[in-house]
Image (cartoon, helix red, strand yellow):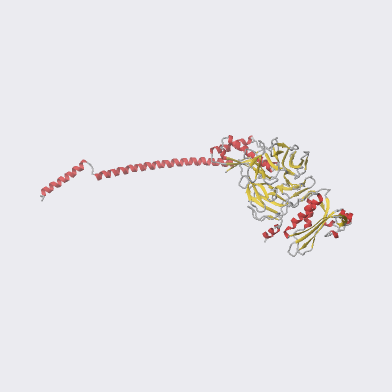
Amino acid sequence: MLTNNKFRTLLIALAATSLMACQTGPSDSELEAEKNAQAEAAQEQAQQEQARAEAERVRVEAAKAEQMQRAQEMAEEMKNELVNQNVIYFDFDRSTIKSDFASVLRKHAEYLVKNPSQVVVIEGHADQRGTPEYNIALGERRGKAVENFFLTEGVSASQLSVVSFGEEKPAVMGASEYAMAQNRRAVVVYQ
Amino acid sequence: MKIMACLKSLHVRHLKYVFISLFVLSSFAHAQSNLTIVITEGMSNARPIAIVPFKWTGETVLPESLSDVIASNLQRSGKFSPVKMVDMPQFPTNDAEVDYAAWANKGVDTIVTGSIEPTANGSFIVNFQLIDILRAQLTGGSTKTMVNNQIVEVADHIVLNQKSEITEGEFRQHAHIISDRIYENLTGEKGAFLTRIAYVVVRDRETEALPYQLAISDYDGANEIRLLSSPEPLMSPTWSPDGNKLAYVSFESGKPQIFVQNIYTTERTRITDYPGINSSPAFSPDGNKMAMVLSKDGNPEIYVMDLQSKRLERITRNRAIDTEPEWTPDGKSIVYTSERGGKPQIYQVNLSTKRSKRLTFDGEMNLGASITPDNSHLVVVNRTQGDYHIARQHRASGDMLVLTKTFLDESPSIAPNGSMIIYSTLHEGKQVLSLVSLDGRFKALLPATEGQVKAPSWSPFLL
């Protein structure tokens, strides 16, 4: 049986031991907690960094998208402009491209080079004079004259095809000089 | 009810001529008559002939007046001037009733009489006689001749005497058959009244969903049938030599392809789908091959396809446009248009040697040649001083004669008896079909009630 004193001494010793332990280093659980806190802080920091990066990425993306949209809008605008200037005219029984139309064809070529996924059909047409079958041949020659112009400007052959409608699809009905001049044409049709 | 009536009027029992019941891509489109023939220039030396109205002994109303159709046919040949009813001295129904002197006094030396009787089974017995008034006046109606060493009395002034049984739906067609007999007997040339034409009608492209239509009708525009309607151009219909099929070019897929279609079953076959031009189909005279124009090898060249094996043979080879092939009647050569000399002119290529020679030299251009069935003439579109007219060139001498005075003439096609050319021209701002006789003296327009009409092709003989 322990005496009261002995019990007290033991208690003090115990307490001293535990006090000593306390003084020499943190307990395991304390270490664990510490570790957790550090990890949490690191995680928090990482998260903050990630968020900042994310925000930066979104900002850049948005800027890029805006830039792309602007480019796209410009391209669209250019395409619309080109679609509205897609007819060139020829002299009677001729398929040579007149110098007046070189600049507009160059604009089409430039757009097609910048937009290699854009495909066009070049339609060749003739006026009513001559036979329908001969005019099919003449219309094809006109279409091919435009195709060759584009090829020399660097457009890929895979973007281009030619269909001749001869005299079968006049732009203007009738046989007046005006109507016939309007019908001797090639049309660049964006697909 | 309406469709039934249409079909009934089209139904023909013994002939493959008219029966068409199905339509591709288009709804039932049997127009009564989009085209009519208006004679613009007759012949002063046309021979007078009287087609006396055929006597009808039945009580119902007949579907068609045989004598009217026969008279119109003969008049449209340019070779006959039918006597008007008011100028007829009498209305005999057979030779026994004819007062020869009365007709001779009117200056009429040929008359046709006839009668129509109903039968118990609802069909009709048609009798007709072609009577030579001059001969009848000479013989008094009969003459004696030796047959098998016996003297017999003959009525040799009755040149034709025929009896046929027809159905209600065969009236118009029978009138064409009688017309062909009369024409052949009096001219020595086979009649082409029992023939048809194929053509393209282009209706308003702004308002019509299917403005391009392929149509066929009797040679005179009657019984028009739309075989095909399309949102995209149809071109160059041409008949197979048996008259059962049409070849044509269709852009229905957005690019030209050659098709062959049976006009009775409407069964359709795509013949070509090459890159570039697929145009100008022309059946060989034996029907086994097809000449065509393809630009798959760079520029338009003439090819011949074996229709069985689909094997292609390239016929021309140069950097110029070669187009519009047409076979010579013997099937050994092809005439075609080529601008290898600078402007389009007509050339002929021998299919075994592939050697070409130029045929036309008159005028700034000559295009779209076809050849008369007897191989005596080329028929072309001739451009002289900027005007495009139908002209014919004598094959042997090379002499060219411009036949028409109309505006922007194109697509000439010759009747199978070689007597007449049908072509497309511009009349009052519209494309219409027009006729001109091979001698250029007879001219007629076929104004259309709707649309532009172009690319006519005359069928072969159908009987």
In this rendering, would A74 be left or right of B319?
A: left
Q: Position of residue A66 (x, y in %)?
A: 48, 41
Q: Quadrant of residue A50?
A: top left
In this rendering, would B118 be left or right of B232?
A: right
Whether residue A71 is visible here, answered yes or no, is: yes
Q: Nearer the viewer, residue A146 or B350?
A: B350
Q: Nearer the viewer, residue B265 or B330?
A: B330
- The number of discs equals 0
In this rendering, would A7 be left or right of B349?
A: left
Q: Nearer the viewer, residue B377 or A121?
A: B377
Q: Quadrant of residue B349?
A: top right
Question: Residue extending furthest front?
Answer: B149
Whether residue A129 is visible here, answered yes or no, is: no
Q: Position of residue A154 (x, y in %)?
A: 56, 35
Q: Position of residue B142 (x, y in %)?
A: 87, 57
Q: Quadrant of residue B407?
A: top right
The quadrant of the rendering that contains the N terminus of chain B is bottom right
In this rendering, would B207 be left or right of B112?
A: left
Q: Position of residue B401 (x, y in %)?
A: 78, 41
Task: Name which residue lies at 29% across and 44% down.
Answer: A36
